[in-house]
Image (cartoon, rainbow, N blue to C red):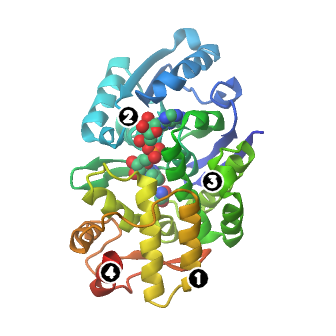
Amino acid sequence: MKLQIPVDTAGGRYPVAIGPGLLSDPASWQGLLPGRQVLVVSDDTVIDLYGERLNQVLATLPGADDRQLGRLVLPAGEASKSLASCADIFQALAALGARRDALIIALGGGVVGDLAGFAAACWMRGIAFVQVPTTLLAMVDSSVGGKTGINLAQGKNLVGAFHQPAAVIADTDTLASLPERELRAGLAEVVKYAAIADADFFAWMEAHAPALLARDPAALAQAIATSVRHKAAIVARDEREAGERALLNFGHTFGHAIETATGYGRYLHGEAVAIGMLQAARLSQKLALAPAEDGRRLERLLASLGLPTRAEPVLAPETILQHMRLDKKATAAGLRLVLWRGIGQALVSQAADDADLRAVLAG
Ligand code: NAD
Ligand code: GLY
C-alpha cells in the first residue's frame, strides 16, 4: 500500500511517498523533472542494486528523448560525505551543462542524500533535488526535513545548508537488500521519535521489535510512516531549528562525539545514537528529570533491536567531552543538550555541568 505524507515548509509543501515498488512507478515521478538535465548521485553499492530500475523508469517519462542524464557514483560510506565529493558533483553538473531547472536525484542512504542535497543547495544558488532513500535511516530521518551537508575532519556536518527536496520517494522494497546491521541502525532513529514524542509508539515498538527485525513489511511501513509523520510535524513548526527541532537530536551530541572519537569506523551513526540516547537518559536520571524505570525500558528496547547500549571499551570521558563541545548546539554559554523527562518527552537544557557529564561518560 502506498502512503503519502505532506511536509509543509516555508518554500511550499512536498510529498514523502512510502510504499513498495515506488522507485519504478512512473506515477512517483510525475511533475518532478522540470528541465532537461538530470544528475543521478549514488554510491557504488546502491547503483548496482537499483540504478537500472531508475534508468528504466526515467526512460518512460515524458521528454526522455531530449533529456541529458548524468551519473555520479561515489564509494559507499561516510568518507564520501566530503568537500571533494561535492566538488565532483559540481564538475558533473558543469559537464552536463546543468541550468537552474536541472534536477539532482539522490539515490542511496543518508550519505548520498546529505551530500547531493548540499550540492543542489549550492549549484546556481539552489536547484531542485529528489530524495530516493534506500536505507531505513534515510527513509525515517535524513531524507525528510532539508538538512544537507558534508563532514570535515574536525567534525560531522560542519558545513551545510537547509534545502528541502522537491519530493521523497521511499520505495520500501529496497530495504530487502539492506544489511542487517544497517537495518538495526535505522531502527535506532525510529526509537528516537518514540522516546522524545510518542509513548504509544514506544509501546508499539516494544511489542513489534521481532517483526521489525524480521522485516515484516506491514511493521516496517508503520514504523516509517509514524516516524515521518513526527518529523514532518516538527519540521513544519520549526524548519530552521530555532527551538523544537533540536529535540530530534536526542542522543546525537553524545553519538556524534562517539563517532568522531572513534574515527567514524567503529560505530554506524544509528549505533552511536543508540549509545548516546542512553547516555542522555542516564544524565537525565542523574539530574532527577527522568524516572529510572523509563531508562531501563529504553535500554531493553534498544537491546532487543540488537543495538549497542554502551561504548565498548569505554571511551575516555575527556575526549568525548572535547568533541561534544564542538557540537552545533553548543554556544559560548556552554553545552546545550537534549535531555529526557521519560518516555515520550524531551527538552533542551543547559543544566548539566562537566562533573555530571564526566560521571555519565565514565559509567
Ligand atoms: P549510508 O548512506 O552510508 O548507507 C549505509 C550503507 O548501506 C552504505 O554502505 C550503502 O551503500 C548501503 N546501502 C544503502 N542502501 C542499501 C540497500 N537498499 N541495500 C543494500 N545496501 C544499501 O548511511 P545511512 O545510515 O543511510 O546515513 C547516514 C548518514 O545520514 C550520516 O552521514 C548522518 O550524518 C546522516 N544523517 C542525516 C540526517 C539529516 O537530517 N540530514 C539525519 C540523520 C542522519
Ligand atoms: N536529524 C535531525 C533533524 O533533521 O533535525
Which of pointers 3 and 1 lies earlier in the amino acid sequence? 3
Residue neighbourhood size for the residue with mark 3, other residues' Cα within 10 Å, grouped as few (<14), some (14–19), many (≥20): many
Task: Please state if 41 lies on the left or on the right of 64 as rendered.
Answer: left
User: In the image shown, does 35 or 240 lie closer to the viewer?
Assistant: 240
Residue visible at 54% across and 18% down? 52
Which of pointers 4 and 2 lies earlier in the amino acid sequence? 2
Task: For residue 188, say whether it is visible.
Answer: yes
Asked whether mark 3 and ligand 2 are closer than 8 Å, the reply comes as: no
Q: CA distance from mark 2 to mark 3?
A: 25 Å
Task: List the residue tagged with mark 4.
Answer: 357
Q: Please say if 129 is above or below 26.
A: below
Residue visible at 32% across and 38% down? 80
User: Mark 3 and mark 4 in contact (Cβ < 8 Å)?
Assistant: no
Task: Please state if 72 lies on the left or on the right of 295 as rendered.
Answer: left
Query: In the rendering, which numbered label is found on residue 293?
Result: 1
Residue neighbourhood size for the residue with mark 1, other residues' Cα within 10 Å, grouped as few (<14), some (14–19), many (≥20): few
